[in-house]
């Protein structure tokens, strides 16, 4: 009535995103802030806001996302640490393990035992005990919790309260590792991690990513991790790279081919510069080019 123009503009967060994430591979998602990394991770994990308009399909081994419960297969790990401050580290992981359950481990274990008997195979006692222990559902304390605390470096603070701003508890790096441990303690085979290095030093980030690399290769999990500025040693742990800019995927493929790809595009990495730092500079040039085309 007052003559104000209330035109609503539609914003495209992701544009024509396609790709395949393979098992036993750990993929690094790189891109400047605001390029759509978090939206992509939420979409793949089935946790996207219902108010957003989505076109296209997401398949897990040929099964569409709406045909099954993605929360039982995939886990999204955010960049914010939300915990119950009155619980200890061990209690937090035990609760997470009981809440997520064992998935299909019990059925898989029964099939393994049957095939071992048919073939006359005598399994290693330690491995056999561990596999049977993590296949039992409903336990208040699981051996899986002790294993996750060991590989995440949380065994030294297992009985310490998580704490918050009003209660003294574990450090910020330990909270970040606890956030990651909460998800990998479950049976999820697809992990989508959003800026897990926020507030961590490069050494702690390297330890976490190293554990995730072993998890992906041993358990045949699919892991997609977004990092803002990874250190060179952390960058080398990944198998594949996804580069995003302005909601579009610039590159998606093996880490071994990325430098030759950009060299064919006219971007050659100097001899003394790390790959991750070079890619950040390439991003800046690509964004400048996109902005210039928009203004023309």
Image: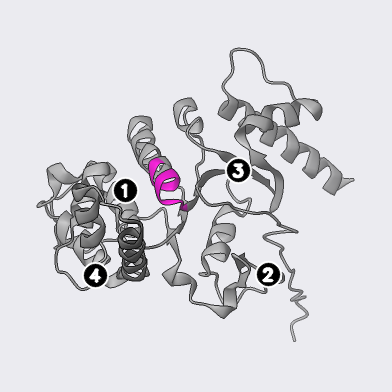
Dot placed on the residue nearer the N-terminal end, 2 or 4: 2
Q: Residues within 10 Å of mark 2 (few under 14, many from 20)?
A: few
Q: Decide whether residue 237 is among the magenta residues.
A: no
Q: Are marks 1 and 3 in contact (CB under 8 Å)?
A: no
Provide the major secondary structure of the magenta segment. Answer: helix
Residue visible at 30% across and 47% down in the picture: 177
- The residue carrying mark 3 is 32
User: Would you say residue 217 is visible in this rendering?
Assistant: yes
Is 218 contained in the magenta span?
yes
Where 87 falls versus 150 (above or below)?
A: below
Label 3 crowd (10 A; few <14 / some 14-19 / many >=20): some
Which colour scheme appears in the figure? one colour
Tell me the element at label 3.
loop
Q: CA distance from mark 2 to mark 1?
A: 32 Å
- Residue under circle 4? 98
What are the residue bounds of the magenta stretch? Answer: 214-221
Q: Residues within 10 Å of mark 4 (few under 14, many from 20)?
A: some
Q: Nearer the viewer, mark 2 or mark 3?
A: 2
Residue at mark 1: 176
Residue placed furthest toward the top = 271
Residue 63 image point, x, y percent: 60, 72
Farthest residue, direction bottom: 1
Residue 51 pos. (x, y %): 59, 77
* Residue placed under numbered mark 2 in the picture: 57
Residue at mark 1 to residue at mark 3: CA–CA distance: 22 Å
What is the residue that sits farthest to the right in this orientation? 296
Badge 1, how many Cα within 10 Å: few under 14, some, many 20+?
Answer: many
**What is the x, y in percent for residue 95?**
21, 67
Q: Earlier in the sequence, mark 1 or mark 3?
A: 3
Q: Nearer the viewer, residue 193 or 19?
A: 19
């Amino acid at each position: 009535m007052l003559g104000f123009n209330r035109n609503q503009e539609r914003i495209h967060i992701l544009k024509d995103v396609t790709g395949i994430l393979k098992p036993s591979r750990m993929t690094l998602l790189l891109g400047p802030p605001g390029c759509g990394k978090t939206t992509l991770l939420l979409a793949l994990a089935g946790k996207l806001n219902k108010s957003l308009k989505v076109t296209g399909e997401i398949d897990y081994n040929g099964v569409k996302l709406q045909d099954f419960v993605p929360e039982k297969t995939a886990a999204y790990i955010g960049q914010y640490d939300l915990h119950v401050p009155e619980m200890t580290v061990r209690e937090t992981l035990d609760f997470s393990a009981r809440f997520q359950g064992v998935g299909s481990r019990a059925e898989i274990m029964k099939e393994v035992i049957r095939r071992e008997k048919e073939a006359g195979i005598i399994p290693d006692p330690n491995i056999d005990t561990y596999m049977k222990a993590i296949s039992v559902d409903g336990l208040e304390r699981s051996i899986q919790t002790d294993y996750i605390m060991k590989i995440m470096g949380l065994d030294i603070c297992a009985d310490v309260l998580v704490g918050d701003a009003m209660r003294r508890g574990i450090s910020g790096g330990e909270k970040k590792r606890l956030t990651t441990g909460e998800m990998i303690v479950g049976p999820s085979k697809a992990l989508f991690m959003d800026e897990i290095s926020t507030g961590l030093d490069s050494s702690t980030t390297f330890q976490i990513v190293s554990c995730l690399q072993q998890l992906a290769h041993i358990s045949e999990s699919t892991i997609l991790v977004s990092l803002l500025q990874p250190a060179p040693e952390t960058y080398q742990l990944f198998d594949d790279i996804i580069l995003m800019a302005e909601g579009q995927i610039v590159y998606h493929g093996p880490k071994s081919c990325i430098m030759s790809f950009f060299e064919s595009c006219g971007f050659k990495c100097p001899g003394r510069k790390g790959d991750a730092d070079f890619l950040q500079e390439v991003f800046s040039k690509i964004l400048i080019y996109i902005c210039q085309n928009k203004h023309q």
